[in-house]
Image (spheres, rainbow, N blue to C red):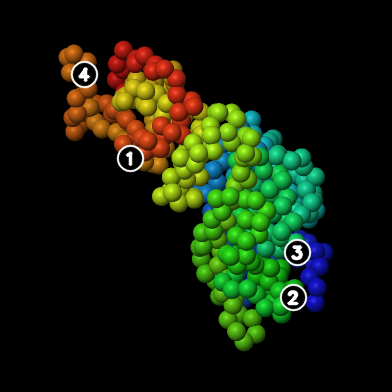
Amino acid sequence: MKIQEETIQQSYSNALKRKKYNSESSCCAPQTQSQSCCPPSTTSGLNEPVSFGCIYLKPILMDYIEQGMTVIDLGSGAGHDLMIAAELVGPNGKAIGVDFTDDMIREARENAQKNNHSNVTLVKANIRDIPLPDNSADVIISNCVINLALDKKQVFNEVFRLLKPGGIMIDADVIATKPLRREIRENSSLWCGCVGGALTKDEHKEILNKIGFTNISVKLGEKEEVQFEAPELIVESGIILAINPMSERMKYSCCNLTSKEVENLANPELPDELGIRILKTVGHPLRLKILRLLLNQQELCTCDLTSVFEEQQPIITKQLARLKEENLIIGRKITFSKEGLMESKLNGKWTAYRINPDKHEFLTHLLSPFISSPQKRAENRCDC
């Protein structure tokens, strides 16, 4: 039996109606809960929009989405993850939801209005053919949707087309532990239940590699057992990350780097996900300025940074915390001598920060095109 897109559309329109009146119903749209991959709820609160995802994405999105970005949500449904993206990109960013179901578009638009998200745009379209220009998005997200697509390769091609060079795809989806048999793939209820269309980890990587994505990683989460006839079928939720690489011209021309110099920037000991996160951390404008200054000045206290950048202390402290979290900088408690020299003190009033020695060479290579002559250290100490 051939799966019809109209069947999927109708199943999710019906699932939305069930979910609105019964929060314990499945986020997927099978005939029975035993043929669904997902637990009853993936939201974190009663007031959130209805979620049709298999993973609660907010903690992950917070790591990758910054103010001012453009984010596209494929299969945005009622807008659960889209509202999170709208909040993270802020008023100067854009959150674009794509869905092919009228009921979902209508529900998401109402949720955007309720949450006062004027930066949300809804587009009715099939995710294999999206009427948006090339290089539109910094981040493309999807949550338990691409497994439903009949032509997944075309969907991933659209993701590649829409991502800006260096942009990232964050796809939360159902992953099969082994290739699915034909009778499973042709079972309409299992397909609509996010099971019949699931790819394996290797199938995901093969498709994404052929398209041209880089830094591909698949992190598996919860295992769910789905009973189908006699044999037991195991599927897992997972996060698929992949990057649209910058072109060769873009890689080297802006910083006048040779290909060998670019290769030297890569740290083979950094796992893909960690490497991506560090690059995003360094890419924040204020964090980049802090690292540049620390590479020039050796060691600075919080009040130095507050003075130099003319920012409020809580803002500086927040950015320092993020850099410490990625182990790029380290701090020590200090006091100042009468001569104004830093002295270590366990219960010191100030904290002095410097580049983590283990990351110094990596950051020097990475930031060398952006490092200017040393800036003068602030002379006036504040009670930070």
Q: Residue at x 60, y 67 (%)?
A: 200
Badge 4 marks a residue whose secondary structure is loop
Q: Residue at x 55, y 50 (%)?
A: 215
Q: Position of residue 197 (x, y in %)?
A: 69, 68
Badge 1 marks a residue whose secondary structure is helix
Label 4 packing within 10 angstroms: few (<14), some (14-19), many (20+): few
* Mark 3 or 1, nearer chain start: 3
Quadrant position of residue 352: top left
Residue 341, numbered label = 4
Quadrant position of residue 56: bottom right
Dot 1 amino acid type: Asp
Q: CA distance from mark 2 to mark 1?
A: 53 Å
Q: CA distance from mark 3 to mark 4?
A: 67 Å
| Tags 2 and 1 touching, CB below 8 Å | no
**Residue 45 in view, yes or no:** no
Q: Residue at x 82, y 64 (%)?
A: 6
Q: Is residue 57 above or below residue 356?
A: below
Quadrant position of residue 322: top left
* Mark 3 or 4, nearer chain start: 3
* Mark 2 or 4, nearer chain start: 2
Q: CA distance from mark 1 to mark 4?
A: 25 Å
* Mark 2 or 1, nearer chain start: 2
Q: Which numbered disc, 2 or 1, marks the residue closer to the eye?
A: 1
Residue 16 in the figure: left or right of residue 131: left
Residue 186, numbered label = 2
